[in-house]
Amino acid sequence: MPSRRQSLLILGLLGLTAAAGGAYLLESHGTSDRPGDSPEGAPPDRPLAPITPPGPVPSGEYLNWRPNAPGFTPVDDRGQQIKGYASATSVGLGESIDFHVSVRPAQKFTVKVFRLGRIPAGAESNLVATSPELSGVSQSAPRVVEPTRTVVAPWAASWRLDVPADWKSGLYVAVFESTAKFRSLTPFVVRDDHKAADLLVVLPFTTYQAYNMYPVDRVLGSSLYSAYLPSGKMGGADICSTRVSFDRPYQEDGLPRLFELDQAFVEWVETQPYSVSYASGLDLHAGRVKVTDYKALVFSGHDEYWSAEMRAELDKALGAGIGVAFMAANNVYWSIRMDASAAGVEHRQVTCYKRHQDPAAVGGVLPTVLWRDLGQPEQRVLGAMYTAIITDPEPRPLVVAGAGHWFWKGTGLRDGDQLAKLVGGEADRVHPNVKDKPDVAVLAASPFTAEGPGGRPHTQTQHTVLHQHPSGAWVFNAGTFYWNHGLSTPGFVDSRVQIATQNLLDRMTGKSGA
């Protein structure tokens, strides 16, 4: 039986996430070079049979945080056995963060906090804190706020974690355990705002929330992609949310969709000789991190939803010569606004009207549409941009190009060599009609199958690219969801991917020649 990470990996390949009573599909993102072009690369209209990746399933103390750890049962949104969320996507050292938890039926519970990544020498596990036994209550059912179809669970805080000043910045999960042995979790980041580092790894919490379908109950659940019809069947873009709230749990066991992409990068990078700090995308938006304190920014996963403030911070970093690496695909795609909650807490709601009329887009306020439809195509920054969902039933090989480039140094690869199982999920390519696009080095050009006009399959080409900003900053775009799996996921690890990624980060951090 595949691990949770491998299971999500399988489903991520297919562009869907398993849900009670069915599955929800990604909407078509479109692939236009210019506004008004016809979209292509739409997802399949039915679930496909999953493919089980080969390779061993990880085990040991590190995995004790998982919802399906031995002795525990993962929750489901219909049962709501124990669900919770955090009061923020990140917390600074020496600060506090609240967890809002509901237990059904009411019973005692505990919260365990784990740091993902490398276990410190001498430590037996990555468990860093445990709450006292807490008295759990069944909090109010989630409700829907119209006209944006925003699902909120305005629960009281159940436990406060005071983060010690000597903790390490990183990606953490709070695991909620009931006495009935049900388990769910929520991720969060611990920041170190006072220490420079080689790398700042930025976690895509706006995209996590965009895809969050909580509650998967055939009634209330809604995301920026899907919502339930009165029949209980899944509807799409015409009825989905136009605003989603962080004041609710993530669906089902609490692992956000495609969380495994970030996890795979974190597990690898912490074995490398770089100093690493962490932030959420909301920290860029709110200006809580100073991007010039780092030699490179790494966007570790699928980071699709960006506010103007986030993009301004990215531009600031590039202008200062800070390297930028996007380790997945379909990044900086939708323009969003971050809005306050009904209680007035800043940055608690992601607003994106997409193809619906945006009522707030007046008086100079940007509409929440594609960045490319605002005349700011992401390819100008990333070097390539989203083209299609990959519909091949198994991951395709990454086909090497530009093998003489320093990026591939030490790998022994030649042009046309194939790196197995690295092209999956979604893909970017260089769009030739984008104006003012940078000159890029194409490091991979890999054929894959996408759904074209009329639902007919057709072949496209995925691109992995690298270019140098006028400031001298290097900008990398993997152009596939699966790059990080080549770094650390069992059954996918490829030493040549590891070497190339080391070459990249060494160049960005000054650990190799200019």
Image (tube, helix red, strand yellow):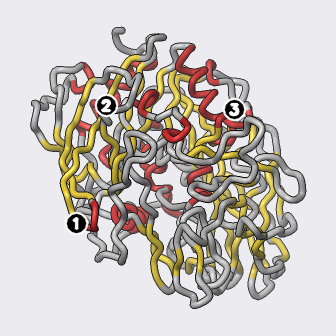
The dot on residue 424 is none
Residue to which mark 3 is pinned: 192
Disc 2 marks a residue whose amino acid type is Val
Which of the 4 image quadrants contains residue 286?
A: top right
Give coordinates of residue 340: x percent, y percent. Answer: 81, 51
Which of the 4 image quadrants contains residue 167?
A: top right
Left or right: residue 194 versus residue 423 is: right
Distance, label 2 to label 1, CA atoms, is 28 Å
Left or right: residue 453 versus residue 360 is: left
Secondary structure type for disc 3:
loop
- Residue 179 visible somewhere in the drawing: yes
For this orientation, the residue located farthest to the right is 343
The dot on residue 465 is 2
Which mark sits nearer the N-terminus, 2 or 1?
1
Secondary structure type for disc 1:
loop
Distance, label 1 to label 3, CA atoms, is 49 Å
Q: Which residue is depicted at the point 33% across and 56% down?
A: 40
User: Dots 2 and 3: beta carbons under 8 Å?
Assistant: no
Which mark sits nearer the N-terminus, 2 or 3?
3
Disc 1 marks a residue whose amino acid type is Arg
The quadrant of the picture occupied by the C terminus is top left
- Seen in the picture, residue 500 relative to 43 is either above or below; the reply is above
- Seen in the picture, residue 514 relative to 316 is either above or below; the reply is above
Give coordinates of residue 74: x percent, y percent. Answer: 56, 77
Secondary structure type for disc 2:
strand
Give coordinates of residue 80: x percent, y percent. Answer: 68, 81
- Seen in the picture, residue 131 relative to 448 is either above or below; the reply is below
Residue to which mark 1 is pinned: 456
Q: Which residue is depicted at the point 30% across and 73% down?
A: 50
Looking at the picture, tell me which residue is in the foreground, 243 or 68: 243
Foreground tag (2 vs 1)? 1
